[in-house]
Image (cartoon, helix red, strand yellow):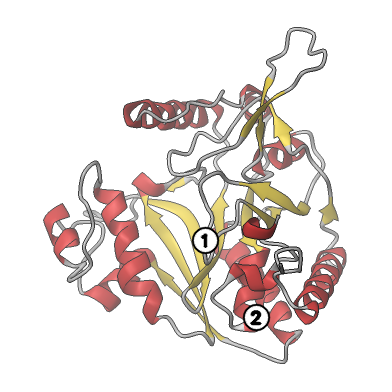
Amino acid sequence: MTGWKPSASFDALRLRARLNAAVRDFFSRRDVIEVETPMMSVAGNTEPNIASFSLEFSGRTDGAPRTRWLRTSPEHPLKRLLCAGFGDCYELGRVFRDGEAGGRHNPEFTMLEWYRLGMDHVQLAAETVEVVRMALALVGRDASDESVTYRELYRRELGIDPMTAPDETLRNALGDVTIDPEGLVRDDWLDLLMTHRIQPGLSPDRILVVRDYPASQCALARIRPPTNAGDPPVAERFELYLGPLELANGYHELADADEQRGRFERDLMVRRNRGAQAPAVDARLLDALAHGLPACAGVALGVDRLLMAMLRTPAIADVLAFDFTRA
């Protein structure tokens, strides 16, 4: 019986400790303050493609809901701190997502999330590249970097315009990749092209920043109107890849409480149509946004994925003391 033993090597666990220390030093030198926020909340993540864990609290609640949701990221409480005037901050800690277990996923994992006042998504993407380069230096590696718009990437790699191509063109671009089309919408096909056609060919020694996504994929990002006639609006967000691994997702943050409420409601409608759970909307975040979110950008980086890239391993179990099968 060996199931009691760690899934990661001792060297990998020591590297994680060195990375955590390096992250804290990186932000300390930039006066970005580490904070800790709740792991349980009365509100859950409404994003349709993310499933949350919930639990029932058995103690006294004074009328508050007994159902609490484990955080899928610390985004909402960090933004509440920004609205209260705290300033640049970050959190390095565990987050939880239901239904995600496998070679590259674990239901609980470590996320580094930080917010920078006065930055947009392009400036924060450049700082995120610095963080990844700092991490690679711990294992004696470096990487080239490139920043490209979402539209440019799809045109270059697939020869299609993701903003204007018909849905049928997107489906056909998957080639011999067989996917059940039931219930899939345009953004699903675009995501499948990224994961099945573009990501597998990305160089492991290149940091790729993809920015300015279709407005329909705005999540919590601002939408920028077109600057030229005929161009579509874009979401001011970015994703960062090191080789085929997606490491980070960042936004020029939406500050409009009414727009945020509308996005939450649209998310819940999608969830109900799919027969999925509909978590409570985060009313405290909406109140905080109504009070005022300073102009800022924020990013979430998967620390386990970063360690996988540093060690050139495809298995998340190799960087966890005990993965889900051994927890």
Q: Which mark is residue 244?
A: none
* Residue 226 is at least partly visible in this image: yes
Q: Residues within 10 Å of mark 1 (few under 14, many from 20)?
A: some
Which residue lies at the image location 44% right of the left edge and 27% below the top edge? Answer: 262
Q: Secondary structure at mark 2?
A: helix
From this viewpoint, is residue 232 visible? no
Would you identify the image quadrant in which residue 141 lies? bottom right
Quarter-wise, where is residue 20 in the image?
A: bottom right
| Amino acid type, callout 1 | Gly
- Give the image location of residue 154, x and y in percent: 29, 69
Above or below, comparing residue 269 to residue 45 in the picture: above
The outermost residue toward the bottom is 140
Q: CA distance from mark 1 to mark 2?
A: 19 Å
Secondary structure at badge 1 equals loop
- Seen at 50% across and 61% down, the residue is 238
- 193 is higher (above) or lower (below) than 44: below
Return the x and y of residue 47 as percentages of the image width and height.
48, 39
Q: Relative to 270, does residue 143 appear above or below in the rendering?
A: below
Report which residue position mark 2 lands on.
310
Q: Position of residue 327 (x, y in %)?
A: 71, 55
Q: Position of residue 136 (x, y in %)?
A: 68, 83
Give the residue at mark 1. Answer: 102
Q: Nearer the viewer, residue 75 or 151?
A: 75
Mark 2 residue type: Met
- Residue sitting at the far front: 1
- For the N terminus, the quadrant is bottom right
